[in-house]
Image: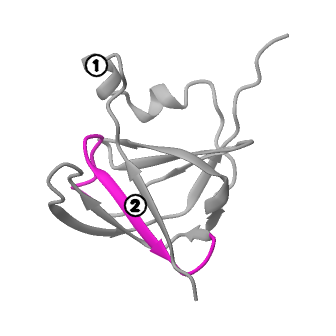
Amino acid sequence: MRILTLVAVAAVLASGTADARTRTVEQALAGRTPGKPVSCIQLPRVDSSEIFDSGAILYRMRGGPDYLNTPGNCPFLRHDRAISTRTPSTSLCSGDIIRIFDAPSHFDYGGCGLGDFVPYPKVKKAQ
């Protein structure tokens, strides 16, 4: 059985401004309406992820929608840390454990279980 590993490194945006590093979930999802939560997303469709200091992860998907996940009781999840996940399938599901670590030092902060994935369709641009 093949095990897929997903590693999302929380990168500071190239501009280096404090605003870019401390963007909120509300700012990232401005103008979007949440859909019905689902329990799994397909890993091959994940284009990138963004970690927020509020303890949420936004999974940006190829072709949309994007999915917001808020792991329960996960105080070490912050924008300046990285996460990794190991799964025996091509899906990432609620209950899967993410490991939180500092990318430069590899210091491990522990793990948290993922919650449901809330879809946020992309806002269509006016034509």
Q: Earlier in the sequence, mark 1 or mark 2?
A: 1
- Which residue is denoted by mark 2 in the rendering? 71
Secondary structure, mark 2, is loop
- For the C terminus, give its image quadrant: top right
In this view, the residue in front, 106 or 64, is 106
Q: Residue at x 18, y 64 (%)?
A: 108
**How is this picture coloured?**
one colour
Amino acid at circle 2: Pro
Q: Is residue 108 above or below residue 60?
A: below
Give the residue at mark 1.
16
For the residue marked with disc 1, what is the amino acid?
Answer: Gly
The image shows residue 27 at horizontal and vertical percentages of: 46, 25
Q: Quadrant of the N terminus?
A: bottom right
Q: Residues within 10 Å of mark 2 (few under 14, many from 20)?
A: many
Question: For residue 77: magenta?
Answer: yes
Total marks shown come to 2
Tell me residue 82's x, y (percent).
Answer: 31, 52
